[in-house]
Image (cartoon, rainbow, N blue to C red):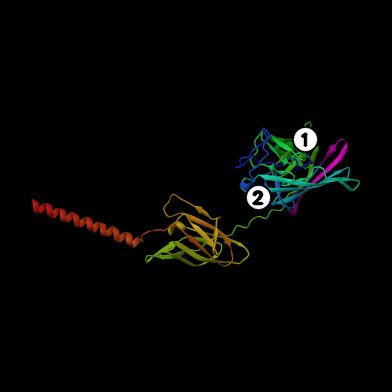
Amino acid sequence: MSAAFGVVFVTGGLGVNSYASTDPGWQDTFDLEDCTLTSSGTNDYFYLEPGYKLTLEGEEDREMIQLNMTVLDVTKMVDGIETRVVEERESENGELIEISRNYFAMCKETGDIFYFGEEVDIYEGGEIVDHEGAWLAGENGARAGMIIPASPTVGMKYYQEVAPGVAEDRAEVISLDDVVDTPAGKFENVLKIEETNPLESNEKEYKFHAPKVGLIQDADLKLVAYDLPEVETPVIPELKSQPQSVTFADDVIEVNVNSSSTISNFALDEENKKISFNVSGAGGTNGTTEIRIGTILEGPYTVTVDGEVKDDVEVIESEEANSAIIKIAHADDSQVISVAGTNVVPEFPIHAIWIASLTGVLILFARSKAARNLTGSSG
């Protein structure tokens, strides 16, 4: 059983994926084909971001053990997937005894993090003497295991490593609300994991994981120091009101537009049921444009930026008529954006509606007069 990454940094259960099992009671097969896998990501218990570091220390078998874990600014292709490299260094009484490089990827859709294997160097007297426990998904029948499920529940049981006969660590969620004291601080709402291995039936270990920190205790080793990665605070662009107008059937329609960029050439193409406009700004930054699209077009909408369809637009609907807002993220330098709908709103300009209403009144009046004349003549 590996020192640390046979452990689980868990935030949750099995997400939206339906995971199968060939070992009764334990999940060991995962629907990775349904995932968009990425080598970066975070959750409440672990960071797959460079700069994340943990140091644990404690006494095992009367020997002082130190375990250092670091998320490296390095990736590795494993079984066709780009994975993040997490390095472990374990020392005994100050002497290096093991270095392992562990490979992880996160499913964007569920938040689950999967373990694709590890390369292990075991040291004696400063020399590499073994590689016991090494495995890689896609080799010798090995498959990725789940190291971080998305929604933990007490009683969950799943395989972390699926390398038959080599590495078969598995985890069970014991509790979600432990309190643990360590040299690095006291932590609450701690996740407790029981780790076992069918290859070593008598071995059982417990790991503890704190929200926003990660592993704080591994058997007798406790957290003494940790560094969280620097996460850049996203700059939220300031939106400025830039009202626009379009002409439809000789009527001028005012359109509420807010954008962090400068809007120009705003126009309606009635025939193709589309509006288009230019945005310009400093360049090299991100921008946002919001349009009260319901005043001119009905959805669903197709948005293109410089001819490429964007799938990440947000449409904010409302029960009020003609009030839908479309929110478009884009680069801030000059480019052409278009929004196509299914119908132009209103279908009839205001003056046409007024004329139609007046015509209806005149027709009704004429019919009423005719009816009165007919009644009078028959009497």
Seen from the viewer's position, the closer of residues 310 and 66 is: 310
Q: Which residue lies furthest to the top in this view?
A: 202
Q: In this image, 145 relative to 122: left or right?
A: left
Q: Is mark 1 on a helix, strand or loop?
A: loop
Q: Is mark 2 on a helix, strand or loop?
A: strand
Q: Magenta: predominant secondary structure element? A: strand
Q: How crowded is mark 1: few (under 14 residues within 10 Å), some or many (20 or more)?
A: some
Q: Residues within 10 Å of mark 2 (few under 14, many from 20)?
A: many
Q: Identify the residue under disc 1.
A: 199
Amino acid type at circle 1 is: Leu
Q: Does the CB distance between marks 2 and 1 fall below 8 Å? A: no
Residue range (magenta): 57-75
Q: Residue furthest right?
A: 125
Q: Nearer the viewer, mark 2 or mark 1?
A: 1
Up the image or down, 97 lies above or below 368; here it is above
Q: Identify the residue under disc 2.
A: 37
Q: Earlier in the sequence, mark 2 or mark 1?
A: 2
Q: Which residue is drawn at 9% across and 52% down?
A: 378
Q: In this image, 277 relative to 129: left or right?
A: left
Q: Position of residue 197 (x, y in %)?
A: 76, 35
Does the image show residue 316? yes
Q: Name the image quarter holding the N terminus.
A: top right
Is residue 69 inside the magenta stretch?
yes
Seen from the viewer's position, the closer of residues 181 and 19 is: 19
Q: Where is residue 372 in the image (x, y as percent from the top left)?
A: 14, 53
